[in-house]
Image (cartoon, rainbow, N blue to C red):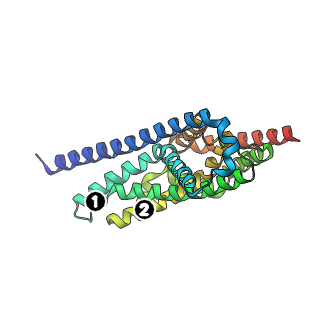
Amino acid sequence: MTAGSLIEGALRRDRLLVVFSLLLVVVLSWAYLLAGAGMMQAMGDMLMPMSAQLWTPGHALVVLIMWAVMMAAMMLPSAAPMILLFATIARRRSERGEPATASGAFAFGYLAVWAAFSLAATALQFGLEKAALLSPMMQSTSIVLAGAVLIAAGIYQWTPLKQACLRYCRSPLDFIMTHWRPGARGALLMGLRHGAVCVGCCWMLMLLLFVGGVMNFAWIAGIALFVLVEKLSPAGHWIGRGAGVLLVAWGGATLLAAS
């Protein structure tokens, strides 16, 4: 057996391991969300009078975990090509004698940034609930707030920051070649950087969860699908900008209906 075939075999094993790991995390995350959404719908009427008393440290931790799992479920599918390419390049470099670079460290760094975003989202949810602006399904009860978020999300789709972050998300090879760092620490730093870019690309889309309902499973799946299409479709840039126009129009119509 030649050295080349051994390397190719190792690459295939690496890819299978990464795909299986990502698939397992995504499936478990979506199962958690589906179960949680069903439970919230069943308890909706009970939660309304209790909302003011729910924000104990334990409840805050549960909400944080919910957001973190939701971000993993929504964002890992679109990040999979980047993680797979990273694993392939890391294996090839290690075969040339460079320091081993763990794809797990890259994925951990990526998810850590979304966990930090989840902490901010939890704080925002706390504020909105205290202001009585959310329903038990964590959907905005204010038409003005919903319209404003829709318009803001639509405008953000056209901003230079959004477009720059989206370009990196859509070009895994460019990102890896530009920001490559060897070793486990380097992989972690690259994952953190990619996570930051991804948050820069999608944070306003995530705030749309407060418009349709944070525990509205169909709404969650719809946003996740849009993120996937925007990042992976050849026409993703234009799809994202077109969606921005629609969001602004939707938000404007919502505000007009409230006036």
Q: Residue at x 40, y 54 (%)?
A: 107
Count residues near mark 1 (Cα–Cα under 10 Å), then give few for <14, some for 14-19, many for 20+.
Answer: some
Between residue 75 and residue 90, name the one nearer to us. 75
Q: Residue at x 26, y 44 (%)?
A: 12
Q: Is residue 136 left or right of residue 175?
A: right
Q: Is residue 74 visible?
A: yes
- The image position of residue 184, as x and y in percent, is 33, 64
User: Could you tell whether 98 is left or right of 146 in the image?
Assistant: left
> Distance of mark 1 from mark 2, alpha carbons?
16 Å
Q: Residue at x 70, y 47 (%)?
A: 154
First in residue order: circle 1 vs circle 2? 1
Assign a secondary structure to mark 1.
helix
Viewer-nearest of discs 1 and 2: 2
Q: Label 2 belongs to which residue?
A: 190
Q: Check contact, mark 1 vs mark 2: CB within 8 A.
A: no
Is residue 74 shown left or right of residue 95? Answer: right
Q: Which mark is residue 74?
A: none
Looking at the picture, how far across and down is residue 80, in whole percent? 42, 46
Q: In the picture, residue 105 is in which quadrant?
A: bottom left
What type is the residue that disc 2 sits on? Met
Residue 250 x/y as whole percent? 75, 39
Q: Is residue 86 above or below residue 150?
A: below
In the rendered image, which quarter contains the C terminus?
Answer: top right
Where is residue 206? Give x, y as percent: 61, 48
Return the residue nearer the eye: 254 or 243: 254
- Dividing the picture into quadrants, the one containing residue 237 is top right
Inspect the image, locate mark 1, and give the three-letter code of the amino acid beneath it.
Arg
Q: Quadrant of the N terminus?
A: top left
Which residue in the protein does label 1 denote? Answer: 93
Tally of numbered tags: 2
